[in-house]
Amino acid sequence: MEVITRRDADQAVELVARLLEMRIRAKPESVLGLATGRTMEKVYEQLAATGVSFAKCSSFNLDEYIGIPTDDPNSYRTYMQEHLFSKVDIDVANTFVPDGAASDLKAAARAYEDRIKAVGGIDVQLLGIGEAGHIGFNEPLSSLMSRTRDKALTPTTRMQNAGMFGGDPERVPKRALTMGVGTILDARELILLATGPAKANIIARAVEGPITSMVSASAIQLHPNCKVVVDEAAAAELQGRAYYDFVFANEPEWAEFRD
Ligand code: F6R
């Protein structure tokens, strides 16, 4: 794992958008694993502004709420359409979001896993992190080997996402269909982005704490090719900063991002 700390959220976002742009330019037929949430909004804005072509890409989103229609303004399909798909040349037929509106959720989950396998797996998976440590909607106690399935959301997550539902956590759906931790770990590269002081404690636990299903993001420690990009605020509780910064300052890969 590498931990890259940028001065502020804008710089952290810029680095992640640039990494994704580079991955797509290097492999135009990339299979992208995408995340939603507030942190990613600017990433997609910047990525779209690079003008990189998504024409040959396909994409798989991490998760979708259960119990709201696909075209609901708060669905993650709508979010992706608004923030990315409508702004780039991706073929929408090649974009996949778990079907939280399916009548048979188990079958929808299996189909999602099969589809990822059929395209040869995910090249690069973008991740945010929840305040309770989730990646995707893998809430505490998610098996580190879990696959796509439906999962009950924690009160913390429903509170965190209430902003999109008029500020009322009770209006946030109770369940979601999410890639499992095991599904996420199968991606060939992980890029986790977290910004702001509310993420400082959970970032320290995910990066430096024990690997535990209580913090599903800690499973990224098992991944051989994982980058964690944070701003100063989200890095505030990391113990190993000096070493992480030393690596960033010396690795040729990061030359273009150094001040
Ligand atoms: C969304 C997702 C979640 C978010 C996380 C952070 O698809 O998978 O894990 O990435 O909840 O959300 P924000 O960025 O809103 O703090």
Image (cartoon, helix red, strand yellow):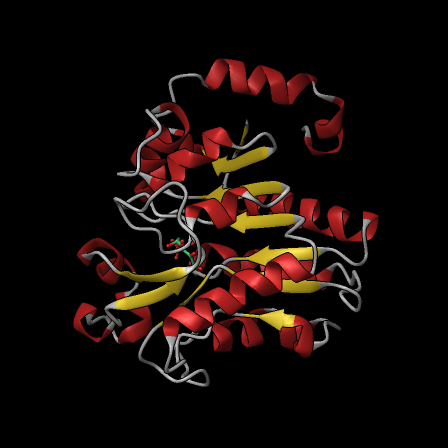
Can residue 46 be seen? no
Which of the 4 image quarters holds residue 89? bottom right
Total numbered badges shown on the rendered structure: 0
Q: For this rendering, which residue is in front, 255 or 33?
A: 33
- The residue that appears at 39% across and 85% down in the rendered structure is 69
Q: Position of residue 162 (x, y in %)?
A: 26, 67
Which of the 4 image quarters holds residue 119? bottom right
Q: Position of residue 186 (x, y in %)?
A: 56, 44
Q: Position of residue 172 (x, y in %)?
A: 25, 71
Asked if 79 appears above or below 193 in the picture, the reply is below
Of the 4 image quadrants, the one containing the C terminus is: top right
Can residue 52 be seen? yes
Asked if 190 appears above or below 254 in the picture, the reply is below
Q: Position of residue 144 (x, y in %)?
A: 38, 40
Asked if 115 appears above or below 249 in the picture, the reply is below
Of the 4 image quadrants, the one containing the N terminus is: top right
Quarter, ligand 1: bottom left
Compared across the picture, whether 78 is left or right of 252 comes to left
- The residue that appears at 30% across and 38% down in the rendered structure is 213
Compared across the picture, whether 34 is left or right of 89 comes to left
- The residue that appears at 48% across and 59% down in the rendered structure is 62
Q: For this rendering, which residue is in front, 31 or 165?
A: 31
